[in-house]
Image (cartoon, rainbow, N blue to C red):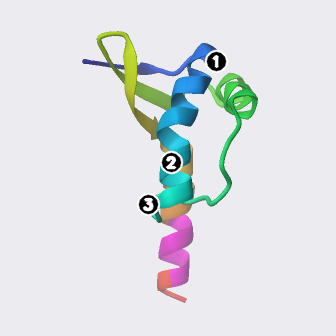
Amino acid sequence: MIIRAAEPDDAPAICDIWNPLIRDTTVTFTNEVRESQEISTLIKVRLGVFFIAENDGQAVFLLNILLFVVGLIFFIERTFD
């Protein structure tokens, strides 16, 4: 397994990983299901923010550093208001 920066071509795999989490759980900091084209654009604009773990050439895990940090800051601000 390798962890690498996501590329625009990874957008469909990222959607496959991320959208069920957005739609079916409360573990994400968003409730908006993402389209592949939107993810591809985000990867291009936010270089170094999206990472995937790849196993035998298939994306199996997604890490979005920016959303985690922003969500954590939002949570902390609301917790100590």
Q: Amino acid at mark 2?
A: Pro
Inter-mark Cα distance, 3 to 1: 24 Å
Q: Amino acid at mark 3?
A: Val
* Along the viewing direction, whichever of 74 and 2 lies nearer the viewer: 2
Specify the segment rendered in magenta.
Answer: 73-78
Label 2 crowd (10 A; few <14 / some 14-19 / many >=20): few
Q: Is residue 77 left or right of residue 61?
A: right
Image quarter of the N terminus: top left
Which residue does the numbered mark 3 point to in the structure image? Answer: 27
Label 3 crowd (10 A; few <14 / some 14-19 / many >=20): few
In this view, 27 is above or below 81: above
Inter-mark Cα distance, 2 to 3: 11 Å
* Along the viewing direction, whichever of 66 and 17 lies nearer the viewer: 17
Which residue does the numbered mark 1 point to in the structure image? Answer: 8
Which of the numbered marks, if any, corresponds to residue 78? Answer: none
Q: At x 48% / y 21%, what residue is drawn?
A: 5
Q: Is residue 4 left or right of residue 23?
A: left
Which of the numbered marks, if any, corresponds to residue 20? Answer: 2
| N-terminal label among 3 and 1 | 1
Label 1 crowd (10 A; few <14 / some 14-19 / many >=20): some
Secondary structure under the numbered disc 1 in the rendered image: helix
In this view, 75 is above or below 18: below
Q: At x 68% / y 29%, what residue is drawn?
A: 36
In this view, 4 is above or below 32: above
Image location of residue 8, percent across then percent down: 64, 18
| N-terminal label among 2 and 3 | 2
Q: Nearer the viewer, mark 2 or mark 3?
A: 2
Secondary structure under the numbered disc 3 in the rendered image: loop
